[in-house]
Amino acid sequence: MSEVYAARRDRLRERCHAAGSEAALVSGNANVRYLAGTAPAGAVLLVCPGRDVLLCPCDPCGGEASGPRAAEDLQVVVLAEADGDPAVAAAEHAAAAGRSSLAVEEHHLTVSRHRALRSVAPRLRLTDLGPAVEQQRLVKDDEEISSLRIAAEIADQALGELLESILVGRTERHLALELERRLVDHGATGPAFPTSVGTGPNSGLAGHLPGDRRVEEGDFLSVCVGADYRGYRSEIGRTFVIGTSPADWQIELYDQVFAAQRAGREALAPGTPYREVDRAARLVLEAAGHGERVGPGVGHGVGLENDEDPRLTPSAMGKLDACVPVTVDPGVHLPGRGGVRIDDTLVVRPEADGGPELLTITTKELLAL
Amino acid sequence: MSEVYAARRDRLRERCHAAGSEAALVSGNANVRYLAGTAPAGAVLLVCPGRDVLLCPCDPCGGEASGPRAAEDLQVVVLAEADGDPAVAAAEHAAAAGRSSLAVEEHHLTVSRHRALRSVAPRLRLTDLGPAVEQQRLVKDDEEISSLRIAAEIADQALGELLESILVGRTERHLALELERRLVDHGATGPAFPTSVGTGPNSGLAGHLPGDRRVEEGDFLSVCVGADYRGYRSEIGRTFVIGTSPADWQIELYDQVFAAQRAGREALAPGTPYREVDRAARLVLEAAGHGERVGPGVGHGVGLENDEDPRLTPSAMGKLDACVPVTVDPGVHLPGRGGVRIDDTLVVRPEADGGPELLTITTKELLAL
């Protein structure tokens, strides 16, 4: 496994050199994990000629001891509290090693930390690495995709089991907690993001935080859940009706969101601009008169973070590649009444390989529970 | 309740004016919540002459709809995706309102965002607000302390119930999940931080992330759990022995950590330097030959964040005030064998009021379960 991380760091090293920087300081947590194999809270990675260095804070909340192991070929330095900010220590290390320039992640580093770096290493020229590592993370390798596949399977299982249990009378909070327990039962490290459960008027709200409302007959129940498996995060969202027969408005709204989500999924192909996926789903909902109610986007990348590039939004720049996992998750919420959200995790694949690979396989029929 | 937030913002406003800034941009999430009463993910608060403005991203993961309500006297602006970064929008707003200077939280704002602010409002002089809001948050009012008291009660209840259940054979992960479910049963919004459960060789490790190890006879079992109640976060840590009679080394180690934790608690008083609290606990463990095994600090502040100022570490500057809630949480871990961690949440009170107020009241005797 270690050589995978080494190869990723080599790619970054080449990119740095091409940009005229001798070394790179990676401080985004998911970026560090991608390149080092582990990322205790607050850890930073120094990628430089010779041996790369992982600097970890002696952090009582890091849980470092129980995290994944670092790639063997890394030099790991655990700092004492007196050593302060690992990023500052890394800059000192680079300066001491005679580096003249260091590329930093200006989108992760705060102004204060950046100033601290400058002050400990005034001779070191600080440049902006930009989202170089995030871009490297876009296209996933087979190992990463199989982790995502397992993460999706786990979420499907947890959701499937919940549907078999009694729902009426239980609160959103308890349903969310039961889902998270089941994720762990099935081998997840934990939830990929805070599980969202919305009932009745809360259904269909994106990212609704579970509250004390109890499931009632006739409710829409919308659930968005994901598993973290080896750091990779799946996402699935489904909406159900509680009771025997859905009302006409529920059937109509469900069909509209389903059609939009299908249009989004069918737009997934290598070379398709991100915004075209958004457009495909959005047009369906606009035609149904819900244009104002569609959120800022209809999907996003998933990987070591739940919500990473690419963003499937109207203003997103760029085109899909093969082996990029994304969600397609449009929804509509009618204030006071509730709504529908349907969310899958898929991997972009060329037509020749059968088109987009659906990782979350729970049915999308409107189930009455 | 609204006037509490208004008063807090007025204090910040005065401080800004004193520092020569016309307006302040607050972007630290807990700081926004402290001043606005709510803080959807990504929201920023503009504190300025006239009406303060809360700018929220139209964030599908914000869960905004279900969070607490914003103070009534705030102007709330929900941005569309196309509007981009709320901090940038706030800077534009300040410039449009004719402000000449804006104090920003350079320890929260990334270099990239700071640059974006400068570019949209080149005439606006950006200064550093520094940890002004964090300092305001140090001393808690009665409302805040009673929320913390309830948060501590909830954690005590969850822990107490766990101890009555069968533990042998269950994994760290499941014990952690059961604790978190019980927190919610007793009225918590959720856990205050990722619940830590360590068994056998993992016991006593600070921030140990629960894994698949099962509780065995003769193990040390250490648990660190806290409740989030109305945003306020308690913390309690206890260590137990599984089986009838603890081994001699377990009794000895427990007594040493207990003595250290008591020394730390007894050092809590208005006017005591932070580092003296660390020293009081650390000396006991150094005398016992565990100096190398003590972590970076022996406690920290709690409030809207689980780990906030003050830090009770050897290098911390500053002195305790009355009504500052802190944890005292020393621990020792013996590699390969396990260890002990004892952690309470207390509120600093003057001698005249009976000294430190203990919020987490679960017994600290060494229980054999």
Image (spheres, coloured by chain):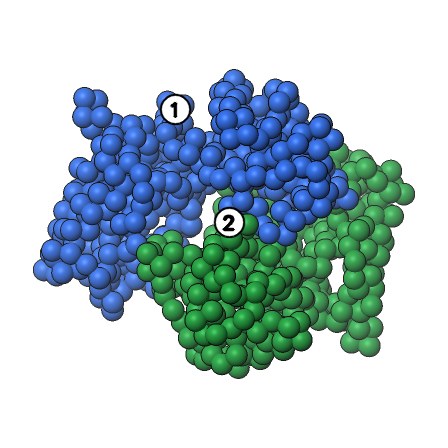
Chain colours: A green, B blue
Give me the disc on residue A112: 2
The amino acid at mark 2 is Ser
Which is nearer the eye, A77 or A268?
A77
Residue A308: give x, y in percent of width and height: 65, 58
**CA gap, disc 1 and disc 2:** 29 Å
Determine the residue positioned at 71% across, 28% down.
B98
The answer to whether residue A89 is above or below residue A292 is below
With A10 as the anchor, is A82 left or right in this view?
left
Give me the disc on residue B55: none
Which is nearer the eye, B354 or A240?
B354
Residue A333 appears in which quarter of the rendering?
Answer: top right
Determine the residue positioned at 39% across, 49% down.
B195
Determine the residue positioned at 63% across, 76% down.
A17
Which is nearer the eye, A255 or B341?
B341
Q: Nearer the viewer, mark 1 or mark 2?
A: 2
Q: Are marks 1 and 2 on the same chain?
A: no
Residue A281: give x, y in percent of width and height: 82, 51
Give the class, few, some or many, for how many residues have Cα within 10 Å of label 1's Cα (few <14, many ≥20): few
**Is residue B43 at least partly visible in the picture?**
no
Determine the residue positioned at 18% across, 21% down.
B352
Residue A34 appears in which quarter of the rendering?
Answer: bottom right
Kindly indicate whether the residue at mark 2 contacts the one at mark 1 (C-beta within 8 angstroms): no
The amino acid at mark 1 is Asp
Element class at badge 1: loop
Residue assigned mark 1? B141
Please state the chain letter of the residue tagged with numbered disc 1 in the rendered image: B
The answer to whether residue B85 is above or below residue B268 is below
Please state the chain letter of the residue tagged with numbered disc 2 in the rendered image: A
Quadrant occupied by the C terminus of chain A: top right
